[in-house]
Image: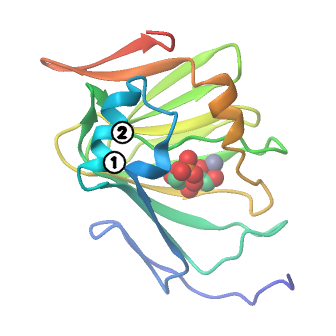
Amino acid sequence: TPPISPFAIRFDAEAATLSPEGPTLERRMSDLEGLFADHDAWQAAVADGDPVVYRVQSSPVPEADRELPQSITTIERGTTAGECWMTKGHQHPNHQGEIYLALHGTGGLLMFDGDRVEWLDMTPGTIGYIPPGWAHRSVNVGDEPYSFLAVYPGGAGHDYGWVLEHGMGNRIHRTGDGFALRPYSA
Ligand code: F6R
Ligand code: ZN
């Protein structure tokens, strides 16, 4: 891909939009196979309307080496057998860092390097730093949609298989008065 020319991107934090717009991705429940602990509950949710769990809207900066793309993810509020709705989660194959800026709602950033687990509370204004080599997943732990801006190296890539193989160290469950982190096997 040839480099693109400089241009302005309008970032509307209130509306959680970037313009001009690049590709928008919609992830439905059926796209999250093998990620929730309760497979039967996941399957029932797919059969029952296959809801949109999150959307990712990107600016037109290409995902190519040395470019610096951005996207805004919005995760709906919901649970599957008590587990909070979340992104699939991925590892960057060539271990590059990334930042997330929380915009709306109440979320969290779960990170796992295959050994250590880290959780960052994400409320509007929080920048979560994802160091190279840490797989990352976003979770909506609040009562409304959770949105955040991501800025990442265009050549970082997305390895979703890594998370299917290694998990994310913890699972996030809704409780009576909030949420709880539980070991992955539970
Ligand atoms: C890019 C990045 C985010 C996520 C987005 C959706 O490196 O981390 O833009 O891609 O939040 O999550 P996934 O990709 O896990 O479905
Ligand atoms: Zn990433």
In the image, is residue 66 above or below residue 175? below
In the drawing, what numbered circle is on residue 182?
none
Residue placed under numbered mark 2 in the picture: 43
> What is the tally of numbered marks visible in this picture?
2
**Label 1 to label 2, Cα distance in Å?**
5 Å
Residue 134, x across and y down, in percent: 69, 31
Q: Is residue 170 above or below residue 92?
A: above
Q: Which residue is mark 1?
A: 46
Within 8 Å: ligand 1 and the Cβ of disc 2?
Answer: no
Q: Are marks 1 and 2 in contact (CB under 8 Å)?
A: yes
Q: Position of residue 112 (x, y in %)?
A: 63, 24
How packed mark 2 is, by other alpha carbons closer than 10 Å (few <14, some 14-19, many 20 or more), is some
Q: Is residue 62 left or right of residue 24?
A: right
Secondary element type, mark 1: helix
Q: Is residue 94 above or below residue 55?
A: above
* Residue 158 coordinates in the image, percent (x, y): 70, 51
Q: Nearer the viewer, residue 84 or 61?
A: 84
Crowd band around label 1 with a 10 angstrom C-alpha radius: few (<14), some (14–19), many (20+): some
50 vs 151, left or right, is: left
Q: Quadrant of the C terminus?
A: top left
- Residue at 63% from the left image edge and 32% from the top image edge: 164
